[in-house]
Amino acid sequence: MIAERIKMLEYYPLASMREYIKVAIVKEAPNEDINPSTIAQILINDFETILKDIRETANLAEANNDEYTLV
């Protein structure tokens, strides 16, 4: 559904994991032993990052009268 919306806006959706990782706002955690409190903090930070991005996207869509992106 997201890819179709991207195409409707006359862009091309990403097609490989390499492309997605390159533009991701949430970064991969290190490949090492991590204690539970560190894991919890990483998750909190990731959710805050995602929420901020959703809000920015919604504001941008609203400013451009793009009701379909908001749905």
Image (spheres, rainbow, N blue to C red):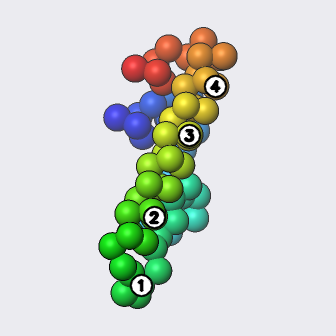
Image location (x, y in percent) of residue 15: 45, 57
Tag 3: amino acid: Lys
Q: Secondary structure at mark 1?
A: loop
Residue 16, above or below 8: below
Tag 4: amino acid: Leu
Cβ atoms under marks 3 and 4 closer than 8 Å: no
Q: In the picture, residue 53 is in which quadrant? A: top right
Other-residue count near label 3 (Cα within 10 Å), few / some / many at <14 / 14–19 / ≥20: few
- Sequence order check, earlier mark of 3 and 1: 1
Q: Which residue is nearer to you in this view: 35 or 58?
A: 35
Question: For residue 60, which numbered disc appears in the image?
Answer: 4
Q: Which residue is nearer to you in this view: 8 or 20?
A: 20
Residue corresponding to mark 3: 52
Residue corresponding to mark 1: 31
Q: CA distance from mark 1 to mark 2?
A: 13 Å
Mark 2 vs mark 4: give the one in front: 2
Q: Secondary structure at mark 4?
A: helix
Mark 1 vs mark 2: give the one in front: 2
